[in-house]
Amino acid sequence: MGTHYYKLPDIGEGVVEAEITAWHVAIGDTVSEEDHIADAMTDKATIELTSPVDGVITSIACEEGDMLAVGAVLVTLEIEGEGQPEPAAEPEVAAEVETAPEPEKPAPASQTEAAPTAPVTRAVTSGKVLASPAVRGRAARLNIDLAVVPAEGARVTHGDLDAYLIAGASSAPAPNASSPQVKPSPASPTLQEAPDTKADELKPGETRQKVIGLRRVIATRMAESKRNIPHFTYVEEMDVTALEEMRARMNERRSEDKPKLTVLPLIIRALAVTLTDWPQFNARYEDQKGYVARFDDLNLGIATQTDGGLIVPVVKAAQSKTVWEIALDIGRLADAARTNQLSTEDLSDATTTLTSLGPLGGIVTTPVINRPEVAIFGPNKIRVKLVMEQGEVAIRKVMNFSVSCDHRVIDGYDAAKMMQDMKARIEDPTSMFVL
């Protein structure tokens, strides 16, 4: 009998770690080659990890929700025949550990004295530094080399960055020759007080769910977006009576090989035609690199709700497709999202995003931009409204339409003008088929 060490494979360019979101085996399980072992999530996609050999699981690397470096041992298996030599220790975490000295207690300003701070044990990272995209982005903005930031664990966290800034880099290890000395930013954030352990105790009737997988990615991206982008939202009411009448006629006359149209493909068509005149909305602001990229193709992210959370697959080159082709794309992507069958290609290269809750769409939405995009569009539900037309009461169908914009790139005047063009195409729907 031998031992096989299955390491987390190289999942894609630029990916150095992945979150293990689900285990499908336990220690002692017998598996065959290609059996599903675990699910791993990166910031780009979810990947099914399968066994490379037949064998018995003798150890697993971590718990669900933990991060694992590419190249680290995922599972070990007992196999027939000769096995592999035990792999060397992972280079991401060095053996050296430093203990920060207890700071001197300042003289009390009143009769009440502060309790002394306990020593903090911090592991020193070396080699390839592990950190989330949010931490990497923040470090880049603060001009800090993550290689010189002491970390409490295998990954550098926001807390480690805070401690490094407060300490003025005094407790950081000396950078190696390949890492230039970096000064901390003079603007240091305020650290939170040490958590109250009693406050963290489980209370009667309380349940807790670990934030992992897609929900963790959503939380990180939304926080990054609100932290970095000055949002504003513009809302316009649009009369969709003629649009709905045209949609009904198109569905009546459609051939059997075409899907039944919802209003969404028509909205996307109107948006695609409108943005040919407003390219600043079909753009990405690479703020750390100092440029705005505009695109000829409208690669439209469609926010799709799944059991695991919100996923944004992409309709590619929407401006070149018919409404029937857009409808087919939406159906295919929605089905793939809900069955976890989306490819990396399906999730990549969005240039702007549309989010719609369909009949649950409410009256007004203020959607959060999917950074580094600069806009996100939000159609709301269609509702009946009584209006006066030539002295008579008429029944019309109306819909509010929202756009949230990055105010660093888009002015309010441009948002208003663009939405008026969009409104004109929605209210005269035949115009959306004239480029």
Image: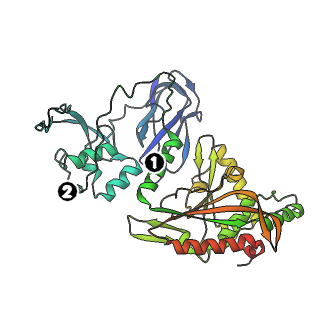
Q: Residue at x 38, y 31 (%)?
A: 85
Residue 155 relative to residue 105: left or right: right
Residue 402 relative to residue 136: left or right: right
- How far is mark 1 from mark 2, CA to CA? 29 Å
Res 80 seen here: no
Q: Position of residue 130 (x, y in %)?
A: 36, 45
Res 266 seen here: yes
Q: Nearer the viewer, mark 1 or mark 2?
A: 1
Q: Residue at x 20, y 51 (%)?
A: 175
Which is more N-terminal, label 2 or label 1?
2
Which image quarter holds the C terminus? bottom right
In the image, what residue type sits under mark 1? Thr
What residue is disc 2 on?
Answer: 181
Q: Residue at x 40, y 51 (%)?
A: 134
In the image, what residue type sits under mark 2? Gln
Could you say which disc has been placed on residue 220 in the image?
1
Could you say which disc has been placed on residue 193 in the image?
none
Q: Residues within 10 Å of mark 2 (few under 14, many from 20)?
A: few
Element marked by disc 2: loop
Element marked by disc 1: helix
Q: Residues within 10 Å of mark 1 (few under 14, many from 20)?
A: some
Q: Position of residue 21 (x, y in %)?
A: 51, 37
Q: Nearer the viewer, residue 337 or 2?
A: 337
